[in-house]
Amino acid sequence: MTSTAADYVWFEERFPELAEAYCFTLVHRLPPSEVLRRLRGREESPRTGAEQVVEAAFGLSDSDDTRQLIAMTTIGDWTLLVEPNGYLGVTEEKALPASAGTRWVSHFVNINGVDSFLWAEDTTNRLAFEPGFPDSRRGTTPDELLPAMHDIGFPFWEGTSDTAEDLSAPAAFALAEHLTGVRITPELLRGTTFACGSAEIR
């Protein structure tokens, strides 16, 4: 059964600092070291739990605003990348080449409410859109996931009202799970020791 936006409302409630601005990426059958290599990154000290990862990310940006911290862990056949206040995973100039031979699923929100979702396969953009505005989509298969997107609870124009709660960010987590089979949990974010690296933003 497909998860829905309601299954991820805990994220903002339990991890408010990370939820303000983040990028989550899942990459199939590539270890963290290879993903970091493809992003032309370098290793950083590991961190345990989302709180330490957020602290390290802002510490890095304070000392070098040209680099972005990337926290990584392996979940089955997938590598999860977490970027506090980052966006490398949805930056097509970096993500599409890095997706060679694999599936790349990423979603992003910044502190101003700007958001983005990217599904790439082997350097090809299959689907890209703003979760807050799912009626406008691009990519080689922009409509393939429409039934799932409706079931998940994205705020399509004809099905929402001005007073509806904005669940676009939780919906992006649910769509990423639909594409990867990987469920992000509070326990994962709280207890994992993440391998960390950093890469140039530009």
Image (cartoon, rainbow, N blue to C red):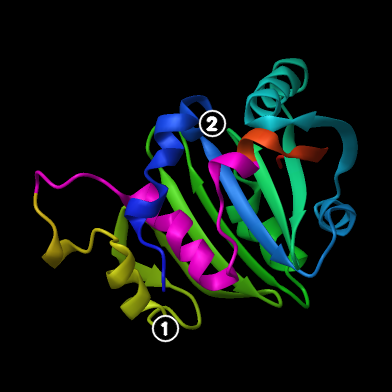
Neighbourhood count class around disc 1 (C-alpha, 10 Å): few under 14, some 14–19, many 20 upward: few
Which numbered disc covers residue 144?
Answer: 1
Q: Residue at x 41, y 64 (%)?
A: 3
Amino acid type at image mark 1: Glu
Residue 160 drawn at (x, y percent): 13, 57
Count the marks.
2
In front here: 61 or 10?
10
In which quarter of the view is residue 94 placed?
bottom right
Q: Nearer the viewer, mark 2 or mark 1?
A: 2
Residue 30 drawn at (x, y percent): 82, 65
Residue 114 drawn at (x, y percent): 40, 42
Image height check: is 185 above or below 140? above
> Disc 2 designates what residue?
18
- Residue 20 makes an appearance in the image: no
Q: Residue at x 85, y 44 (%)?
A: 41
Image height check: is 41 above or below 80? above
Image height check: is 21 above or below 92? above
The magenta stretch spans which residues?
162-188
In which quarter of the view is residue 150 placed?
bottom left
